[in-house]
Amino acid sequence: METKLNSSEARDIAVIGAGIVGMSCALFLQRDGHRVTVIDPVEPGSDAQTSFGNAGSISMSSVLPTALPGIWRKLPKMLADPTGPLAIRWRYLATLAPFLVSFLRNTARGRVEANSRAIAALINGVFDAYDTLVAETGTQDLIIRRGSLKVYKTDRSFAAAAFERKLLSENGFEFEILNSDELRQLEPALAPIFEHAMYLPQSGGSTNPGQLVRRFAEHFVARGGTIHRARATGFQFADGSVSAVIAGSQNIAADAVVLAAGSWSRGLARQLGAPVMLEAERGYHVMLAKPPVTLQRFTMFADTQFALGVHDDGLRVTTGVEYASVDAPPDYRRIRALLPQVAESVRGLDITERSIWMGRRPTLPNSVPMIARSPRHANAYFAFGHSHLGLTMGPVTGRIIADLVANRDPGIDMTPYRVNR
């Protein structure tokens, strides 16, 4: 339900970041009657944004954090194999060390389960928040609700996913186990090489994430919002509160500020009293033409660690996690090396590369985003660290930020998302 403030309660709020998280925050704040300015150096939804090139999944099943029990045994191999599903660039290892120490601490089973519960609590509100924004922005044509799949070639790979299924069950998410015949009936585009599948009927996706963000931004501007094209570099303070955002050559006055700048949030968060261990979890995609019989839903391929998303312009292949400097040049070897296995997985698929892209997902060691007030400035709010679930969690994060600004109960325990967790 939309809550309109009277003119004396409305505030000037600056949102730093025009990706899916930032635009969602801006729209929910605008619904409350606030005067909102979004600050970002690039056009919303452009290919310079991480929100442009994600897999397109709106997931009701991604409850697994990246830090999992036993992953420490695989780190030496990851360091040695730049084409593996998780790669760390040697030159960045010393810088990454504090993050890795915290990451490894989060592989303890108890922590994994707690982090999974925190992720699940946000996912539970995903489509309620999406339904609100999609209805208001008229973007129903960009959303699909056909569920998602995770497929397995062997009994061994299916058995290895038992912990994931346990966490899904414990957190109340629906899934169905399909045999090879049931899978072929549901998704005939898949090659007949998969023995098992997990169907997740509550999930969905966007057929064009970049366009979704652009249309969110257009609606925001049409309703009186402002988008300021500049990079935020700092803040002005008065009486312990943020009074303005320094953006390019201008100081944008603000009664409150929301930091939703993705992987570029780290330095600004430090200025706001939070020295967070935020890293750029770099991800890649390749666009392929749709085959004659194409996939109908987002599909994860467990054995080879890639995913295929249904996009307006074709099928989008996404894979892997790479830790490197946010400004390091892309390394396309990993995703290109996977294309022959992609071809084996979908009938009649032409793996001629139509385009290739790299983006930077903002990641914290426990994979749980930071959605909270600054510990130092009560009128500053954090909304970053969504890892590979930015598209999924963007609108629910926006709703929660609007609740925090209005001192409303967000409806969930916010302890896991605080700065000092």
Image: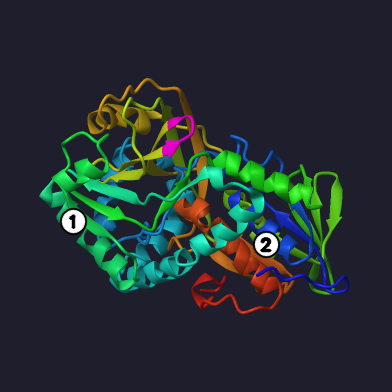
Residues in magenta?
310-314
Residue 81 at x, y percent in the picture: 30, 38
For label 2, the residue is 28
Q: Nearer the viewer, residue 363 or 132?
A: 132
Q: Quick check: 374 above or below 211? A: below
Image quarter where the N terminus lies is bottom right
Residue 306 lies in what quarter of the image? top left
Question: Residue, x 85% and y 44% (percent of image)?
Answer: 249
Residue 341 lies in what quarter of the image? top left
Question: Residue, x 39% and y 71% (percent of image)?
Answer: 117
Total labels drawn: 2
The amino acid sitting under disc 2 is Phe
Residue 43 at x, y percent in the picture: 69, 38
User: Callout 2: few (<14), some (14-19), or many (20+) C-alpha neighbours within 10 Å?
Assistant: many
Disc number for residue 129: none
Q: Which of 192 and 164 is in front in this view?
A: 192
Residue 125 at x, y percent in the picture: 50, 66
**N-terminal label among 2 and 1:** 2
**Left/right of residue 396 with respect to residue 26 in the rendered view:** left
SS state under label 2: helix
Q: Do the residues labelled 2 and 1 touch (CB within 8 Å)?
A: no
**Left/right of residue 149 with respect to residue 228 in the rendered view:** left
Disc number for residue 160: 1
